[in-house]
Amino acid sequence: MDGRAFLHSSRILLNSPSEENRRSAVGRAYYALLHEGRVKLDLWGFPLPPRENIHTFVRLRFTFPTHPDLKWVGDALEELGLLRNQTDYRLSTPGRFASDRDALWAVQLSQDAIDILDTIDADAARRTAAVAAIRAAWP
């Protein structure tokens, strides 16, 4: 299974609107991008080291480089991570999950970031620049 399959789960959940499904859809959207990012990093020569936290490893490899596409993906991971924390740990009130708006936004953000990863990977020059930027940030 690939990470993007979680987006399919998100969309299925959103077809049955409820607070719990919205919250779950956000979590799946975050994990879709996280796992797709990890796979791309691995393909580009940055495997997840043993005993390394996947969340930190992936997020920082996309957040710290100065490459604009990587930065965009890193920002998306940050935003989705913050929203996922709200879905999982702030249960006392529906808040942002009383409507579909934020869950739909999360799914779209994840899809857009995965599309950027695919675009980088499909273009040799863009991929080379991205890999160089990661190496510069993580010598």
Image (tube, rainbow, N blue to C red):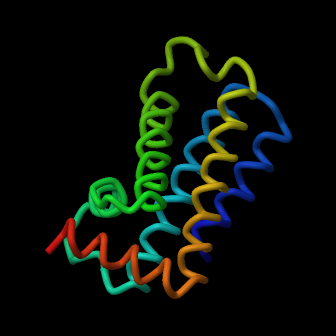
Taking the spot 21% from the left edge, 71% from the top edge, the residue there is 136
Q: Pick whichever, 88 or 29, lies toward us.
A: 29
The x and y percentages for residue 8 are 74, 59
Q: In this view, does 124 lie above or below 39?
A: below
Q: In this view, does 42 lie above or below 34?
A: below
Taking the spot 49% from the left edge, 77% from the top edge, the residue there is 126
Residue 111 found in image quarter: bottom right
Taking the spot 35% from the left edge, 78% from the top edge, the residue there is 131
Q: Is residue 11 left or right of residue 59?
A: right
The tally of labels here is 0
Q: In this view, does 130 lie to the left or right of 111?
A: left
Residue 52 found in image quarter: bottom left
Taking the spot 55% from the left edge, 69% from the top edge, the residue there is 117
Q: Is residue 121 left or right of residue 66?
A: right
Q: Pick whichever, 56 or 90, lies toward us.
A: 56
Q: In this view, does 103 lie above or below 98?
A: below
The x and y percentages for residue 55 are 34, 56
On the rendered image, what quadrant is the C terminus found in?
A: bottom left
Q: Pick whichever, 72 or 92, lies toward us.
A: 72
Q: Pick whichever, 138 or 103, lies toward us.
A: 138
Q: Looking at this rendering, what residue extends furthest in the left direction? A: 139
The x and y percentages for residue 59 are 35, 56
Residue 129 found in image quarter: bottom left
On the rendered image, what quadrant is the N terminus found in?
A: bottom right
